[in-house]
Image (tube, rainbow, N blue to C red):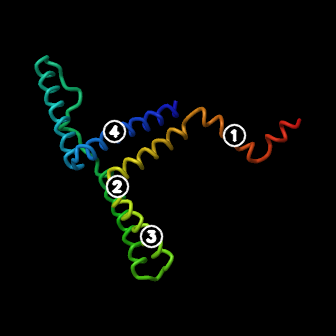
């Protein structure tokens, strides 16, 4: 059951990513316009549902005005963001001061590769390709046929399959 859930997540992520890619790459729209479009559709849908419920005298099961994020969740999100930005800033500071030459060259090479890829293709295309690779990885990790073939391949690599055939 857990494998099906992961496959469903991967397919849902791939479908959403395809829609975002279409909106941003082919329609030449920004991610901000996509978020605005989605929020407008959600707002209009909720308004129409609210009017229909009121017209049919059905009570709304969940009041959207009561939705709030907890203080702990907000603190965790901000702490994660601060830690991520702090870690990146720390790595870039060490690389910029020149104390660690290997780190400096790794950062320069990574930034140069990102710059070259950014000149060749749009950022949306790179993000979509990464999303597709991630979804393929998730699908392959949870696939039954791959799960049954992996032990056979590992036995062949270790040489146990050859010994079994000789018996």
Label 2 sits on a secondary structure element that is loop
Q: Earlier in the sequence, mark 2 or mark 4?
A: 4
Give x and y (percent) for residue 46.
18, 31
Residue 151, numbered label: 1
Q: Quadrant of residue 162?
A: top right
Residue 41, numbered label: none
Question: Is residue 6 rendered to the left or right of residue 146?
Answer: left
Question: Is residue 35 rendered to the left or right of residue 127?
Answer: left
Question: Is residue 137 rendered to the left or right of residue 72?
Answer: right
Q: Earlier in the sequence, mark 1 or mark 4?
A: 4
Label 3 sits on a secondary structure element that is helix
Give x and y (percent) for residue 145.
60, 32
48 to 27, vertically: above or below: above
Q: Earlier in the sequence, mark 2 or mark 3?
A: 3
Q: Residue at x 15, y 22 (%)?
A: 53
- Count of marks, rendered view: 4
Give neighbour class at mark 1: few <14, some 14-19, many 20+ (Cα, 10 Å). few
User: What residue sits right under mark 4 in the picture?
Assistant: 16
Residue 109, numbered label: 3
62 to 73, vertically: above or below: above
Gap between marks 2 and 3 measured at Cα: 18 Å
Q: Earlier in the sequence, mark 1 or mark 2?
A: 2
Q: Earlier in the sequence, mark 4 or mark 3?
A: 4
User: What residue sits right under mark 2 in the picture?
Assistant: 121
Quarter of the figure with the C terminus: top right
Gap between marks 1 and 4 measured at Cα: 33 Å
């Amino acid at each position: 059951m857990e494998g099906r859930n992961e496959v469903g997540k991967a397919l849902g992520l791939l479908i959403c990513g395809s829609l975002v890619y279409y909106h941003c790459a082919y329609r030449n729209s920004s991610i901000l316009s996509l978020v605005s479009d989605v929020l407008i559709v959600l707002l209009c849908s909720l308004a129409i549902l609210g009017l229909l419920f009121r017209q049919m005298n059905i009570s709304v099961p969940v009041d959207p005005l009561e939705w709030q994020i907890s203080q702990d969740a907000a603190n965790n999100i901000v702490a994660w963001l601060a830690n991520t930005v702090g870690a990146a800033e720390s790595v870039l500071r060490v690389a910029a001061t020149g104390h660690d030459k290997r780190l400096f060259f790794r950062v320069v090479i990574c930034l140069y590769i990102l710059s070259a890829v950014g000149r060749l293709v749009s950022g949306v295309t790179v993000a979509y390709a990464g999303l597709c690779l991630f979804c393929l990885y998730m699908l392959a990790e949870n696939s039954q046929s791959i799960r049954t073939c992996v032990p056979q391949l590992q036995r062949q690599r270790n040489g146990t399959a050859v010994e079994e055939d000789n018996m």
